[in-house]
Image (cartoon, rainbow, N blue to C red):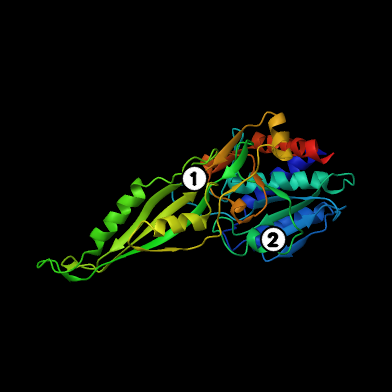
């Protein structure tokens, strides 16, 4: 059965690659996932572009595991030398947009869910959600599903981790900052230059270190990534706007980080959102121990995923390599998918039976 599911999963991934599915435009890829459920006689539901199902013998008295990955992609960058929508296999590599991030994880989890679907002696329920809008952190992706699906006790989020156990993940806080001064003529030096005021705060962002450090994720990292001021050479600007990308560890909530920043800088600071918090799962959690037993290593991930919208413990785990994500000529090794399905099933078998 596993061999058959694996072959079918690889064919599904080829079809997904051949189907454009940018964030918010995932209707056609959702139809492919619906076809998978239909072909395997699995009862499913759809909400917007999210497709979900629960195991056949779902029992409300049992705890529930969420299996989740996304079927949206970023837009292909200009560095592609291959057709991003052509699922070409060459030297063991399956090329195509979304193959690695996160198509390989998605089809592997779908195969895993299908493997367990009809089992009636499981220790846990399983809910599978193939979600949209992950790449854009949209409001109509997994976040919108949490009020629809049954309550979740813990989750496996499918993202490329080389099938190692990402037991912690940094959150994201994007800060819009505005330094204010007064305008004047540059020749006279009259005015209060907002750029100079911004520089003082930018130095603070560059040099400040948060006192608490995460065991798995290290330090909170703040990076100034955009700046804008002035509209002509001879006018001292009254405002200077800049953006700060903050990668938050599990040592702080996003709200705590925002409060610390606001108490230390002179500029006005507004957060675009506080909902993309850091996430983690205890190292002694049964699903983590099951992975360690099978030779998997634990680590902390610096990249953001749909874990950020969950309030339950969650583990990021999947075939492929995060360093290939969003790159030109994206690919995943076929044997990574084969290994991914096998390992997902083995890890879940450790706690399911």
Q: Using the rendered view, name the quadrant where residue 175 is placed.
A: bottom left
Marks 2,1: beta carbons within 8 A: no
> Does 47 sit above or below residue 164?
below
| Residue 186 image position (x, y, % from top left) | 14, 66
Quadrant containing the C terminus in the rendered view: top right
Instruction: Tell me the quarter of the image containing the N terminus.
Output: top right
Question: Which quadrant of the structure image shows residue 162?
Answer: top right
Which residue is painted at 72% across and 29% down in the image?
Answer: 293
Tell me how far mark 2 sits from mark 1, CA to CA: 31 Å
Q: Is residue 253 left or right of residue 3?
A: left
Task: Measuring from the top left, give residue 134's x and y in whole percent.
Answer: 59, 56
At x 37%, y 62%, the residue is: 177
- In the rendered structure, which disc, 2 or 1, sits on the residue that comes first in sequence? 2
Q: Nearer the viewer, residue 257 or 157?
A: 257
- Few, some or many C-alpha atoms within 10 Å of disc 1 (few <14, some 14-19, many ≥20)? some
Q: Residue under label 1, please give it.
A: 327
Q: Is residue 281 left or right of residue 348?
A: left
Residue indicated by mark 2: 146
């Amino acid at each position: 059965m596993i061999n058959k599911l694996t072959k079918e999963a690889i064919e599904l991934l080829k079809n997904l690659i051949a189907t454009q599915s940018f964030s918010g435009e995932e209707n056609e890829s959702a139809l492919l996932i619906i076809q998978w459920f239909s072909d395997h006689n699995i009862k499913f539901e759809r909400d917007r572009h999210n497709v979900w199902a629960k195991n056949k013998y779902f029992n409300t008295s049992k705890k529930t595991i969420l299996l989740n990955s996304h079927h949206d992609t970023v837009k292909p960058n200009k560095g592609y030398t291959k057709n991003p929508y052509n699922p070409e296999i060459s030297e063991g590599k399956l090329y195509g947009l979304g193959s690695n991030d996160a198509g390989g994880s998605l089809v592997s989890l779908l195969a895993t869910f299908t493997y367990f679907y009809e089992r009636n002696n499981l220790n846990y329920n399983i809910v599978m959600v193939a979600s949209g809008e992950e790449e854009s952190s949209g409001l109509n992706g997994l976040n919108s599903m949490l009020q629809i699906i049954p309550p979740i006790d813990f989750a496996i989020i499918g993202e490329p981790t080389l099938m190692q156990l990402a037991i912690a993940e940094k959150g994201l806080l994007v800060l819009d900052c505005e330094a204010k001064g007064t305008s004047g003529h540059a020749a006279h030096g009259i005015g209060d230059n907002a750029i100079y005021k911004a520089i003082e705060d930018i130095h603070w962002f560059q040099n400040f270190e948060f006192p608490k450090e995460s065991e798995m994720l290290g330090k909170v990292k703040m990076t100034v990534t955009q700046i804008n001021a002035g509209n002509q050479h001879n006018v001292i600007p009254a405002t200077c706007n800049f953006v700060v990308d903050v990668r938050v560890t599990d040592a702080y909530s996003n709200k705590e980080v925002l409060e610390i920043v606001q108490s230390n800088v002179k500029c006005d600071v507004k957060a675009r959102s506080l909902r993309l918090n850091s996430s983690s799962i205890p190292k002694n959690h049964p699903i983590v121990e099951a992975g360690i037993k099978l030779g998997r290593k634990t680590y902390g991930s610096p990249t953001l995923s749909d874990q950020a919208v969950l309030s339950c413990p969650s583990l990021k785990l999947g075939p492929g390599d995060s360093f290939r994500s969003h790159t030109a000529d994206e690919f995943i090794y076929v044997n990574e998918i084969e290994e991914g399905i096998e390992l997902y099933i083995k890890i879940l078998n450790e706690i399911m039976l």
